[in-house]
Amino acid sequence: MSQVLAMLYVLVTADVPRVLIIDEPNSFLHPGAVRALIEILREHPQHQYIISTHSPDLISACNPSTTHILRKKEGATVIESVDARETKHLRSLLMEVGARLSDVFGSDSVLWVEGKTEEICFPLIVQKMLKRPLSGVSIVGVLHTGDFDSADARSAFRIYEKLTGGQALLPPAIAFIFDRELRPEKDRQDLIRQSQGKVSFLQRRTYENYLLHAEALASVLKAQPGFESKQVTSEQVQAWIDKNSTEAEYYPKGKTRNFMEDVDAPRLLGDLFAAFSDNTLEYNKVQHSLALTEWLLEHAPAQFQEIADLLASKLPAPANASRA
């Protein structure tokens, strides 16, 4: 509070316009207080404010007229200017794809994935199975993967590549990993070609297809509120899966019926959770997928070997590996 009062004292008592320099206000203020301070500064536009920060939320709140990025290079500080119009345009593009500046700011590169579930679970697979850091890579879920199904998928890629295609504020996109869904092989190859090899697809229909493990499902079900008294066993879960695995409703428009690869796993999991809870528990795609992922990584990591191999092929080599 003492530092804020000192700033505000200068602000309201200055009888002429001044240049006020504020160093990392987010380091000593609650985020809500930072936003409140910025609003007060806006009420006195006669002054010029120079603010240093590493906080993307503060950059967004300030809506600065000019932005400069300082980097250390060969023992000296190098200053790069960012066009304010470009900054605003990039923010609007981020909103279009359902991301925020804080999702990618400060990263070296971005790996775009199917959605929020993969955004949360893929880093766990990297950590537990590849046993390596992400090395400055942000894994971010896209908003509408259906945009990439259009005849001219290139237009959709332009949005994402412009977001992470060399702008000073945002890192480049290294790859896109999507669910296979029901895309024909030809369409998948077309998307790979149009993206110049940046797009890859899971070998199974969705990420949830890798979560179809009876013991993991029984464990997660038993951990849900209200299930303490229920005797849910992996044998019961497996019996339910075996009974329903060939039902046509779980293969809409599907031309093949390889259960693990082709079944509509999100729909199947929704029905399974409803069946074992007497319709009192709904399958939460993010929450329950995360719980299943954590269990499988602990007890049956081989379930994710395909995904781990794909991630390893897309992520840059760790710094120590490149030195070796």
Image (tube, rainbow, N blue to C red):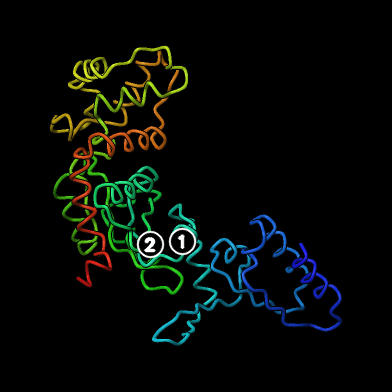
Q: Classify mark 1: helix, strand or loop.
A: helix
Q: Position of residue 235 (x, y in %)?
A: 23, 16
Q: Residue at x 36, y 61 (%)?
A: 160
Q: Quadrant of residue 298?
A: top left
Q: Position of 118 compared to 250: left or right?
A: right
Position of residue 223 relative to residue 25, above or below, is above
Q: Nearer the viewer, residue 183 or 174?
A: 174
Q: Name the amino acid type tagged 2.
A: Ile
Crowding at label 1, few (<14), some or many (≥20) Cα neighbours within 10 Å? some
Q: Quadrant of the C terminus?
A: bottom left
What residue lies at 35% left-to-right and 25% top-to-bottom?
A: 270
Quadrant housing the N terminus: bottom right
Q: How many marks?
A: 2
The image position of residue 142, as x and y in percent, is 38, 51
Residue 82 in the image, given as x and y percentages of width and height = 50, 77
In the figure, 53 relative to 155: above or below? below
**Residue 102 or 9: which is nearer the viewer?**
9
Q: Which label is found at residue 159?
A: 2
Is the Cβ of the residue at disc 2 closer than 8 Å to that at disc 1?
yes
Q: Nearer the viewer, residue 82 or 14?
A: 14
Which residue is labeled 1 in the image? Answer: 93
As measured in the structure, the alpha-carbon distance from the residue carrying label 2 to the one carrying label 1 is 7 Å
